[in-house]
Image (cartoon, helix red, strand yellow):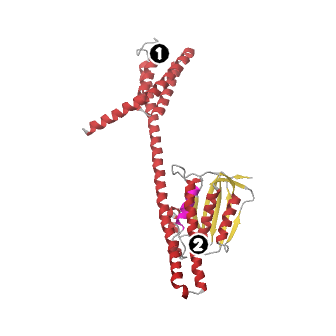
């Protein structure tokens, strides 16, 4: 009963598909018949007429994705060529010398061509569906990574703020002025970190359209100005850091959302500051035929090799492993990857002999 039920289900689906696709099948066959009649009136060449009907069958297979429609079109084409364009005209005659072979050959070619086209179309649809599911899975994984990074990055500075403020309130009378300034400085630093993280979270809303797909509104912006804004913003928070900037002599325009790219540069600079333990950062810009690359290089202890692959997946850099006592870089690096991906670029991390470096690319730059 189960096998019979399955067969009836597939038969019903085939009939439904045939009925639904019947109008377009009739329209294309009618067009092929009209063209064949005009062509036959001037040339009397049945071979070329067969090609016209095979082309119609391919178009039907492509447009309908129905095996029934393809087989129906194949049978109609074979019989109509015999009936309308083979002597005696307007009569079926399969007794002509060689025609049975032609009849069978055209029927096989037509059905086979239709089946191949439908199969390829369905495979294409399946690949698109798999790609859609993969994108949805990646989006869900990105959301989970962001949430994990948020929970991690929120906990550390909030714990420090609570601890410093509690110590200040409970031991204010016993603290020296130096201790008080140190505690207030810790609170200010962690509050700035939280403010920067909130700006990161707000940036997420700029890179999602109504369907939640990562996209950005890009306009051509001068790369030098965007870098300058990011560096000035960073220097206001960390005035003792030295940033050596290397730019091409040409004036570079890049399609981008300047606010988001500035956020990426600021995140990477801040990451280099907290995790390098050094007061020197290099920012280098290089141009290539199809993209421009921006590299931010620090001179610290580097990144542990075992976390390089998952660095942008929300785990970030574990502060305990670095031993510097600073917050992780989870949400910042995850957001950087999302922003650069929405711009059609790439981002990567690696170690050089004297520390770590992050490189991201932006495509479609122009030189002035």
Q: CA distance from mark 2 to mark 1?
A: 83 Å
- The magenta stretch spans residue 337: yes
Q: Position of residue 338 (x, y in %)?
A: 55, 57
Res 241 → quadrant: bottom right
Q: Is residue 119 visible?
A: yes
The residue drawn where x is 55% and y is 18% is 39
Q: Which residue, as the protein is rendered here, is positioned at the far left?
A: 1
Location of residue 51 with respect to 153 vertically, above or below: above
Please identify the quadrant where the N terminus is shown. Answer: top left
> In the image shown, does 175 or 270 lie closer to the viewer?
175
Please, what is the dominant secondary structure of the magenta stretch?
helix
**What residue is pinned by disc 1?**
84
SS for tag 1? helix
Residue range (magenta): 329-340
The residue drawn where x is 57% and y is 15% is 42
For marks 2 and 1, the one nearer the N-term is 1
Q: Position of residue 177 (x, y in %)?
A: 60, 85
The residue drawn where x is 48% and y is 58% is 143
> In the image shown, does 329 or 120 lie closer to the viewer?
329
**What residue is pinned by disc 2?**
274
Q: Which residue, as the protein is rendered here, is positioned at the far top?
A: 88
Q: Position of residue 298 (x, y in %)?
A: 62, 70
The residue drawn where x is 43% and y is 26% is 74
Location of residue 108 with respect to 360 vertically, above or below: above
SS for tag 2? helix
Q: Position of residue 99 (x, y in %)?
A: 43, 18
């Amino acid at each position: 009963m189960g096998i019979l039920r399955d067969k009836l289900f597939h038969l019903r689906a085939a009939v439904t598909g045939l009925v639904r696709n019947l109008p377009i099948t009739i329209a294309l066959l009618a067009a092929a018949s009209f063209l064949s009649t005009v062509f036959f009136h001037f040339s009397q060449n049945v071979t070329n007429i067969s090609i016209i009907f095979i082309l119609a069958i391919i178009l039907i297979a492509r447009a309908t994705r129905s095996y029934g429609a393809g087989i129906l079109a194949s049978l109609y084409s074979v019989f109509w060529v015999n009936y309308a364009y083979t002597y005696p005209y307007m009569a079926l005659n399969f007794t002509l010398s060689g025609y049975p072979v032609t009849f069978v050959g055209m029927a096989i070619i037509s059905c086979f061509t239709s089946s191949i086209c439908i199969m390829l179309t369905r495979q294409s649809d399946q690949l698109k569906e798999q790609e859609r599911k993969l994108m949805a899975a990646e989006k869900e994984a990105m959301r989970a990574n962001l949430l994990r990074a948020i929970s991690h990055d929120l906990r550390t500075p909030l714990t420090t703020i609570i601890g410093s403020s509690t110590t200040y309130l409970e031991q204010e009378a016993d603290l020296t002025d130096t201790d008080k300034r140190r505690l207030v400085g810790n609170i200010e630093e962690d509050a700035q970190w939280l403010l920067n993280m909130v700006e990161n979270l707000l940036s997420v809303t700029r890179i999602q359209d109504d369907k939640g797909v990562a996209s950005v509104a890009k306009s051509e912006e001068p790369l030098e100005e965007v870098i300058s804004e990011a560096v000035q913003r960073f220097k206001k928070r960390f005035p003792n850091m030295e940033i050596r900037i290397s730019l091409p002599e040409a004036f570079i325009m890049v399609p981008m959302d300047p606010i988001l790219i500035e956020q990426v540069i600021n995140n990477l600079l801040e990451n280099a500051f907290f995790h390098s333990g050094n007061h020197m950062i290099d920012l280098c810009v290089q141009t290539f035929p199809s993209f421009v690359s921006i590299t931010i290089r620090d001179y610290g202890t580097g990144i542990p090799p075992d976390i390089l692959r998952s660095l942008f997946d929300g785990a970030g850099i574990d502060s305990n492993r670095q031993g510097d006592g600073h917050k992780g870089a989870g949400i910042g690096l995850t957001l950087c990857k999302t922003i650069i991906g929405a711009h059609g670029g790439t981002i990567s991390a690696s170690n050089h002999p004297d520390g770590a470096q992050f490189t991201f690319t932006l495509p479609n730059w122009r030189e002035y």
